[in-house]
Amino acid sequence: MKLDPAGCYRAFAARDARFDGRFFAGVTSTGIYCRPVCTARLPREENCRFFPSAAAAEGAGFRPCLLCRPEVAPGLPGTDAGRRLAFAAVRLINEGALAEGGLAGLCDRLGVTSRHLRRVFGSLLGVSPVAFAQTQRLLLAKSLLTDTAMPVTDVAYASGFASLRRFNALFRSRYGLTPTAVRQGEPGRLPAGDAPTLTLGYRPPYDWDGLLGFLCLRSIGGVEAVADGVYRRTLAISRNGVVHAGWLAVAHAPAKNAVRVTVAAGLLPVLPAVLTRVSHLFDLACDPAAIAAGLAGLADGHEGLRLPGAADGFEVAVRAILGQQVTVAGARTLARRFAAAFGEPVSTPFADLTTVFPGPARVAGLTVDAIASQGILAARARAIIGLARAMAEGGLVLSPAADVAATRAALLALPGIGAWTADYIAMRALAWPDAFPHTDFGVKKALGETDPKRVLERAAGWRPWRAYAVMHLWRSLQGETA
């Protein structure tokens, strides 16, 4: 990604949060690189070099600033084809794809050649996928060393390193400090415990209350809960045939333009994947200024509205099927029954979190009668089983790393899934910013239209941000739908 040094320096001098995560500034006089929002003394312009990613800055020999902490900067949104591919690759890297299948395996899952992926990464992020992954592991380790009292060995493995020796050597060669030295320099870190808390940044403004309200209205009892301004949930992630389950909690830290994520010990072996899913669920990579400009006034006064994502794509898809032509409250009741009947119990310190939502393999083996016994229509039970089988067999993946057009077509080919359901899944599970369920009752009501064709015509000017337009239209109806 070509950067304008003069423009970057102006943003750096202004500490403009809109550019946080969009570039990083390397200071040649100190050998340190910073976020645009760093509060340290502004260096001279001639001493600054600008990079499209933290990995590119580190590749040029710069060390991360201990004050602004580049490891908590928000990620980049994925809209155009190149960014979408990089966005998907980053998601898969954090899910462990490189560790499991190497670069060839990652490219196979993305359906591109290694040459093309390296070219896209080099253009947008300034480094190769392997170098990017290495920097991500180091930055996560730095965050754990700074924010928690986890033993260094646990930090290494939670960050994705296969050996402590490799972690220590790479950390010292890259940052000029041992992991222990970084920890000694951070006396204010949190006390030791089984559930460390980390920080993830975003670009302001951020409508935390709006997003939390959306999730609260749709929360699945036993799986999710919202209380005292904190979102909590259970989660299970499979890695190399082993299922890691536990709970997480997300709280707002507005003074830092960030959220604080607490993760139970059971999920630490898959911590990068957990944090990636939290970022997706809370839309932390969003660029609110660009979206507000693209919505031509629709976002006025509510520029911080986010597109709620998904911690688990299958869960959101089942929730979408259960929500077909019923109220939000009705779908929530059905989802709670479904999870209680077929989910797995999990131990948590919270009385309202007891169950992990059932995965595709479990649901694929259910009968229509078993699901219907929970008050779910037989047609929807068949749709849920068909969805589960498609995912369990590996032919359907519901995550931001999936190809949108192919996934939408695959969804529409399943029984009981129409355009509304496919588009809702694309909005939330696929994080597709241009998804637009134009037949939605609430969308039509908010626009004062009854003809879906007219709805599409009126929404054309909102591309590629029509999913955000849907959120604004639903907001105007105070969450009556979906």
Image: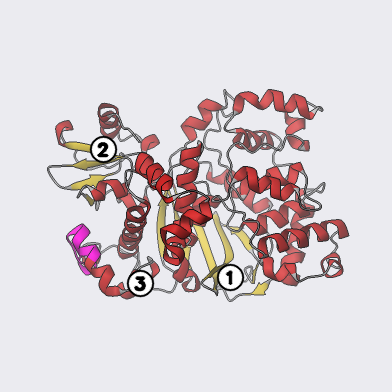
Depicted 175 relative to depicted 240: above or below: above
Distance in Å between CA atoms under marks 2 and 1: 45 Å
Counting residues from the N terminus, which is met first, the one under dot 2 or under dot 1? 2
Q: Nearer the viewer, residue 421 or 71?
A: 421
Measured as percent of width and height from the top left, residue 178 is found at 20, 66
Depicted 8 relative to depicted 394: above or below: above
Q: Please state the extent of the stretch shown in magenta in the rendering.
A: 170-181
Q: Secondary structure at mark 3?
A: loop
Counting residues from the N terminus, which is met first, the one under dot 2 or under dot 3? 2
In the rendered image, which quarter is residue 432 located in?
A: top right
In the rendered image, which quarter is residue 50 located in?
A: top left
Counting residues from the N terminus, which is met first, the one under dot 3 or under dot 1? 3
Distance in Å between CA atoms under marks 2 and 3: 32 Å
Measured as percent of width and height from the top left, residue 409 is found at 70, 45
In the picture of the structure, the residue carrying the numbered disc 2 is 50
In the rendered image, which quarter is residue 158 located in?
A: bottom left
Q: Are marks 2 and 3 in contact (CB under 8 Å)?
A: no
